[in-house]
Image (cartoon, coloured by chain):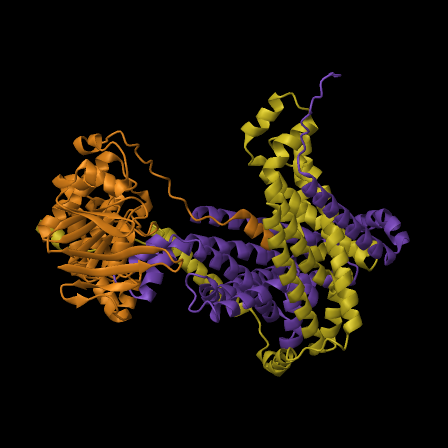
């Protein structure tokens, strides 16, 4: 299980993003972290795998202390935690298969990964995961040819192939339409149940959080203001987290009229004309 | 319009008074500098020659036609040399420029305080000096010939390739790199999986583009003795074989257009 | 999980899918490289002989000898600077009509083809080749250099201006035309604001390039620092050469930084 104690983060700009957070996440629990932008949700999960360096506090995953680990140990720690990103964060110019296999980078040596010679067991597992999310026929497509929902599935496979003990999920539905959002959340929930995997899911959509999480933690300005089951999330609590608003409709029905985010065409890196011209 | 009441007319001006004054001052200063510079040039100019130029041009033009087509057989070898200078020079520069770009990019450099300034200085030094000057230098050091040309092109191109490449590296999407890092990859693996795929198209485009420029530049390196078709051109000009000169100019144009076409095609295929 | 899936192999698919094309390219590149390296004659004895001279050249930078040819350096550099300034201004002034004429979307066909061919000629030749001919026509000295740089500037700036006008937002220009503006008014209000910011930046870039080029056209007699540099190399006066090169680098850095600063200030 994951145990966070007194987690504090002060950014170099002086902003105090987290003010001594305590959270325990038992094995197999899917926990949603909600809160307005700037509440520190993203900082929490980035501190857990130390993409962001915590200022104070302790984080232990199954009795290993994460804060203070040195580079080699930190990398071994990171491979025990899978992360799923907002905007997918797939390496767009690599194929689906390469993206999934990149989840095994912590286990193979440099030259092996350079030559794309992963062990057959990894490749079997990659195909199995891709089949599980319904993408095995797309293994050799380039990641930027996929739709948003498909990309996020690949992102999930990349996290799961690490064979993690904990899943860190950062706004998985931020750029997806409502239907795909539900499918992705359902998939994450199912996969966590299959593997008895704990997950921390940052999410701004309260509705989705209530539908798919077993526990909800509300964060406001770097402090926990709610920690409990989804059905105790009353309008009063939401007002405390987000501020005054008519919450009744949010709690009762899905806001399906949310605008679907259009799939932005992949912006290919192009060489800027002036720069080249200016240098001739 | 003559109103009896006092009507405060709103005056519209494009700029406020202070800005307007600054703009005028800038124009005045610019014009003064321009006139001053032109005067100095004019002092060193023999205007009789300049006035005579159209007649001279006509005369020269007449002597250049028709091009000495039969001389083309002597040019195949210099053309081949020119191509090699450009290609081999480009390859050398790429090999050297990649690590320099890696050290110069803010997000990949091993040290912002020490390594980065050195890399940036190498880039500036290489770019400030024209390939012809590099050639001049190398001809006196390693002797005239193709080798000096290759090295000159290589040294000049390092700065160009490295500058564009490091800017491309700085513009990558960090979240993709972060995602690879979060899997527990080593820094080397993070580079290969997170950064290299993102800059690859830019890198290929830059290389081909520089090759195209290098073809152009290597046509003239011979003027200072660094091999290629410029050597023949220089000889023909000093010996006043104008019909050969015009043939070579045509050959140079053809080579340049061809290389531009090839580079445009290749870049199009990559992107 | 089916058995067939159990041991599905995976290899990174090659970048070029068609096998014959891939192999032709690889083979072609190998053949070219071996031919190129095989036919490039390098006089290694001469290169070996030159190495101490190279070392001498490098040590000449510590410290460079500014005083030996100081007056010539000042003379040459200032000539280079005059040529740069005058050629950039005149070149840009001339390239505006040429560039407008070479924009397909606002010029009639005959004008378009004429202007495009002017640009093509100017861009095809290296500055140094142009300089050789202009020196023949106008005599030695900075005037030939000025004409060379002006001509080269027209090719560079005119082409980019034309492309920029072709890429502009047609609806904005159309809106200005709809007000009943005359042709020049239309250029001033509909076209100019769209292309101006980028073109100011490019003008400053060109100033940079012109200075760098002005350093070499002296080699063929076009005025500027190039002649001094050529002489010092020919006489193996590496310490003066090093001084000149450092001055060039310093000025290029200065113009690059100040033009970057100016560009930010203008925009």
B257 left or right of B9 in image: left
Vertical order, C101 against B252 (above or below): above
A66 sits left or right of A266 in the view: left
Q: In the orientation shown, which residue stands out farthest toward the right?
A: B48
Q: Position of residue A145 (x, y in %)?
A: 32, 43
Percent x, y of residue B258: 57, 49
In the image, A262 versus A101, the foreground residue is A262
Query: How many numbered badges does the structure rendering display?
Result: 0
Residue A27 in picture, x, y percent from top left: 10, 56
Write down which chain is painted orange.
A
Task: Tell me what hue chain B is rendered in.
Answer: purple
Q: Measured from the top left, where is residue C261 in percent x and y?
A: 60, 54
**Residue A76 shown left or right of residue B53 in the figure:** left
Residue B220 visible in the shown view: yes
Q: Nearer the viewer, residue A261 or C135?
A: A261
Q: Colour of chain C?
A: yellow
């Amino acid at each position: 299980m994951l145990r966070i104690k007194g987690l504090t983060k002060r950014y170099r700009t002086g902003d105090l993003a987290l003010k001594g957070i305590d959270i325990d996440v038992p094995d197999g629990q899917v926990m949603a972290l909600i809160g307005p932008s700037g509440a520190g949700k993203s900082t929490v999960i980035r501190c857990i795998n130390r993409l962001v360096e915590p200022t104070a506090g302790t984080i232990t995953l199954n009795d290993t202390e994460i804060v203070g680990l040195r580079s080699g140990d930190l990398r071994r720690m990171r491979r025990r935690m899978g992360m799923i990103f907002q905007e997918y964060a797939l390496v767009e110019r690599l194929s689906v298969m390469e993206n999934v296999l990149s989840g095994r980078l912590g286990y193979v040596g440099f030259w092996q990964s350079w030559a794309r010679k992963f062990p057959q067991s990894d490749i079997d597992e990659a195909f199995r995961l891709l089949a599980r999310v319904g993408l095995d026929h797309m293994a050799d497509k380039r990641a930027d040819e996929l739709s948003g929902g498909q990309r996020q599935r690949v992102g999930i496979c990349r996290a799961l192939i690490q064979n993690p003990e904990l899943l860190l999920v950062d706004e998985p539905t931020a750029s997806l339409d409502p239907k795909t959002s539900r499918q992705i959340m359902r998939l994450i929930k199912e996969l966590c149940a299959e593997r008895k995997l704990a997950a921390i899911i940052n999410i701004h959509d309260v509705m989705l959080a209530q539908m798919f999480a077993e526990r909800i933690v509300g964060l406001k300005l770097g402090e926990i203001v709610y920690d409990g089951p989804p059905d105790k999330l009353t309008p009063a609590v939401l007002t405390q987290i987000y501020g005054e608003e008519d919450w009744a409709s949010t709690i009762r029905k899905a806001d399906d009229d949310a605008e679907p985010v259009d799939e932005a065409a992949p912006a290919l890196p192009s060489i800027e004309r002036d720069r080249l011209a200016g240098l001739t | 319009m003559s109103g009896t009441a006092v009507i405060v007319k709103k005056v519209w001006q494009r700029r406020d008074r202070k800005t307007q004054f600054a703009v005028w001052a800038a124009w005045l200063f610019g014009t003064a500098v321009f006139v001053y510079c032109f005067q100095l040039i004019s002092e060193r100019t023999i205007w009789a020659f300049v006035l005579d130029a159209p007649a001279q041009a006509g005369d020269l033009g007449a002597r250049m036609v028709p091009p000495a087509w039969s001389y083309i057989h002597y040019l195949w070898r210099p053309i081949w040399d020119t191509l090699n200078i450009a290609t081999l020079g480009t390859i050398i520069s790429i090999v050297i420029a990649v690590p320099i770009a890696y050290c110069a990019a803010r997000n990949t450099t091993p040290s912002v305080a020490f390594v980065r300034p050195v890399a940036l200085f190498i880039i500036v030094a290489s770019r400030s000096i024209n390939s012809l000057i590099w050639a001049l230098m190398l001809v006196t050091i390693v002797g005239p010939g193709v080798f000096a040309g290759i090295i000159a092109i290589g040294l000049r191109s390092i700065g160009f390739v490295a500058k564009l490449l490091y800017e491309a590296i700085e513009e990558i999407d960090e979240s993709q790199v972060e995602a690879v890092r979060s899997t527990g990859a080593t820094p080397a693996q993070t580079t290969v999986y997170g950064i290299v795929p993102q800059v690859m198209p830019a890198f290929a485009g830059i290389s081909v583009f520089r090759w195209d420029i290098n073809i152009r530049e290597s046509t003239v390196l011979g003027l200072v003795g660094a091999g290629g078709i410029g050597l023949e051109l220089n000889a023909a000009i000093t010996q006043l074989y104008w019909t050969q000169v015009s043939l070579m100019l045509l050959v140079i144009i053809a080579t340049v257009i061809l290389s531009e076409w090839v580079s445009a095609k290749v870049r199009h295929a990559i992107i | 999980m089916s058995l067939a899936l159990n041991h599905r192999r995976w290899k990174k698919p090659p970048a070029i899918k068609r096998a014959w094309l891939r192999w032709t390219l690889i083979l072609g590149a190998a053949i070219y490289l071996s031919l190129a390296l095989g036919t490039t004659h390098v006089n290694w004895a001469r290169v070996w002989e030159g190495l101490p001279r190279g070392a001498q050249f490098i040590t000449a930078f510590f410290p460079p000898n500014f005083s030996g040819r100081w007056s010539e350096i000042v003379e040459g550099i200032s000539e280079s600077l005059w040529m740069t300034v005058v050629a950039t201004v005149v070149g840009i002034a001339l390239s505006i009509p040429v560039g407008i004429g070479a924009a397909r979307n606002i010029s009639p066909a005959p004008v378009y083809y004429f202007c495009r061919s002017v640009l093509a000629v100017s861009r095809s030749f290296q500055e140094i080749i142009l300089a050789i001919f202009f020196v023949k026509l106008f005599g030695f000295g900075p005037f030939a250099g000025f004409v060379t740089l002006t001509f080269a500037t027209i090719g560079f700036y005119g082409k980019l201006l034309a492309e920029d006008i072709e890429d502009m937002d047609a609806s904005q220009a159309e809106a200005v035309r709809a007000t009943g503006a005359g042709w020049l008014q239309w250029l001033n209000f509909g076209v100019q604001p769209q292309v101006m910011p980028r073109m100011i930046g490019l003008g400053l870039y060109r100033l940079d390039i012109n200075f760098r080029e002005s350093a070499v056209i002296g080699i063929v007699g076009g005025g500027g620092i190039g002649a001094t540099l050529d002489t010092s190399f020919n006489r193996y006066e590496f310490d003066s050469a090093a001084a000149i090169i450092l001055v060039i680098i310093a000025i290029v850095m200065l113009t690059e930084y100040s033009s970057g600063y100016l560009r930010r200030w203008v925009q």
